[in-house]
Image (cartoon, rainbow, N blue to C red):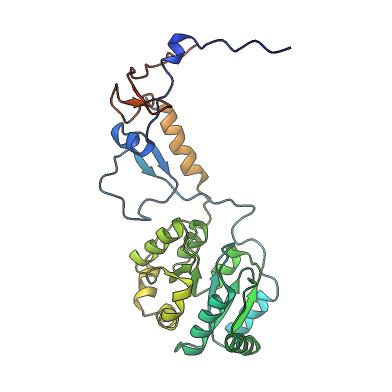
Amino acid sequence: MLAPPAPDPPPDLASRRLKESTTWKAAFKWNLPIVIPMLPGSFARPSDWPPAFRCTDFIFLRSSAPGGGTLAPPVSTFISAARAANRKLMVMTFSSMPVPRAAALGSCVEMLTKSKHDFALLYVGKKQSDTVPSEVAAAAEKLAADGKLLEVGGADFGLLFKEMDAFVVHGGLGTTVEALRMKRPVAVTGILLMDQRFWGGVCFDKGVGPEPRHVEAFKDIAADWADRALDPASDYATAAAALSFGDEAEDGISANVAEFARLVGSSLAPPKSHLAPREAPGVDGSISSFTEPQQIPKTA
């Protein structure tokens, strides 16, 4: 037996439904509140943003206290050996990004063999299955044998980053901000998708690293990057030391909850379209007139 058709909504409710709109335009026109979970000052705020667009703090998922526990071998032994040899440490990581191993190792070899600094480099991430040129593979094997290069699939960044003197990352928000909080130089490279270019631009604008480059082109500047990043008197190091990207012990939850509580407690107007009355497009693309949504009275 077929169910009876649903009744039409009451006319007063139908008149209050939201009309199609472009969210970004509506936010500007009606000064709609937007909460941006980034620390104020993380990037240059666009001059046309209204006061209702507010930055709060970064949100991090913490399973335990930052830095709790210890690093395990082979990472811990690699770091200890590097420190014993008076070598500085750099980490390169691309998280889950499918960065060709040939390009990543090529840059590692370039830095470790041509930089003026005697340092050790830790590569954290999945070993991709692409073919590595024989000369690059041979050089990487020698560097590994000399204790200057280690490749591992993963590590606790909360612990590892505290040990590093410079960072090469893919430009994801979490990894980049965690690196910036260490007040050390940061370079962004990789496949540079979506916000990865934005965060690469932030690092460049803050003066802590070069302009973001695709991983296939990073090799061209890799040695110069290493020279400047590991020099405590360089422009990169000086700028990084002056950074303030929040307290690593904070997960950002309190600041964001407080902002939403403030908004809920304020007198917010109902959402509106960015289009003027009589200009709202219907689902079929036609233009129909409508009245602005009315304030819905609160019930006791």
Question: Is residue 158 shown above or below 250?
Answer: below
272 and 116: which is toward the camera? 272
Identified at 39% across, 74% down, the residue is 237
Q: Position of residue 32 (x, y in %)?
A: 35, 33
Residue farthest to the left? 47
Q: Quadrant of the N terminus?
A: top right
Quarter of the rendering containing residue 127: bottom right
Identified at 60% across, 66% down, the residue is 159
Identified at 49% across, 83% down, the residue is 111
Quarter of the rendering containing residue 294: top left
Question: Is residue 155 shown above or below 3?
Answer: below
Identified at 45% across, 47% down, the residue is 37
Q: Is residue 140 left or right of residue 16?
A: right
Q: Position of residue 269 (x, y in %)?
A: 36, 24
Q: Position of residue 126 (x, y in %)?
A: 64, 68
Q: Is residue 3 left or right of residue 10?
A: right
25 and 238: which is toward the camera? 25
